[in-house]
Image: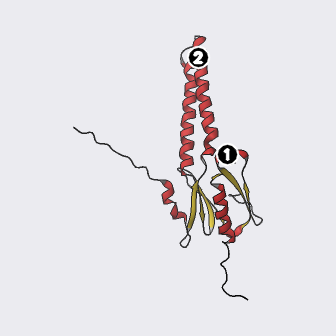
Amino acid sequence: MAATLVRIRIPDPTARDDKYLATRERLVMMVRMHWAIMLPIFLQTLGSIVLAVLLTVLLDGLKVGGGIASLPWWFALFMILRMLWRVADWHVDHLMITDKRLMKVSGIFFRKVQTMPLEKVTDLTYNRDPMGRLLGYGEFIVESAGQDQALSKIQFLPRPDRLYLTMCDMMFGGAPAPSSSDD
């Protein structure tokens, strides 16, 4: 008897986000936030596991048993589940650049779409700290005419040089076409 493999296909939620585009709007670029945004949660989870191991050894040496000895492992399990939730949340969060606006889509159960029209952007600051240069992420600070926007600071952007050039092209237009007439 041959065993049958069953493959479960999980739909990619980012593939359906074209529903947020207007009728005559064109998607230029879509990126997920850089994986470095997950480093703190990974380190916290690893720390909780190390702490659970150390406390287990300490409590075993003190001959403490029962429910108290299992408490560090319950905490470590909570931290692992928290990390898995954050990874799932990171997986569905992404930034979309269209020919008309900048959108950040986030949320697993409750979708949140933050939008800023490109025509309202008055200043775009691009930052890369040493860790960002090492790992390959950057940050945009977006300012608009006298308004406080939800997308004012976008951190952990992957391929920030390419994103910056794309944003500049979208806001200021590409290089002007050479003219054929000599006026």
Q: Residue at x 54, y 21 (%)?
A: 70
Residue 53: x %, y % from top left: 58, 22
Q: Residue at x 66, y 68 (%)?
A: 169
Q: Quadrant of residue 123?
A: bottom right
The vertical placement of 52 against 82, above or below, is above
Please tell me the numbered disc located at residue 14.
none
Tag 2: amino acid: Val
Residue 41: x %, y % from top left: 62, 38
In the picture provided, is 126 more to the left or to the right than 9? right
Q: Residues within 10 Å of mark 1 (few under 14, many from 20)?
A: few
Q: Which residue is mark 2?
A: 57
Tag 1: amino acid: Leu
Q: Residue furthest right?
A: 146
Q: Nearer the N terminus, badge 2 or badge 1? A: 2
Residue 118: x %, y % from top left: 67, 67
Q: Secondary structure at mark 1?
A: helix
Q: Quadrant of residue 50?
A: top right
Q: Residue furthest left?
A: 1
Q: Residue at x 59, y 31 (%)?
A: 46
Of circles 2 and 1, the one toward us is: 1
Query: Quick one: 94 or 175, which is closer to the camera?
Result: 175
Q: Residues within 10 Å of mark 2 (few under 14, many from 20)?
A: few
Query: Quick one: 2 or 6, which is closer to the camera?
Result: 2
- The N terminus appears in which quarter of the rendering? top left
- The C terminus appears in which quarter of the rendering? bottom right
Q: Which residue is mark 1?
A: 134
Q: How is the image coloured?
A: secondary structure
In the picture provided, is 13 more to the left or to the right than 177? left
Q: Secondary structure at mark 2?
A: helix
In the picture provided, is 88 more to the left or to the right than 138? left
The vertical placement of 172 against 129, above or below, is below
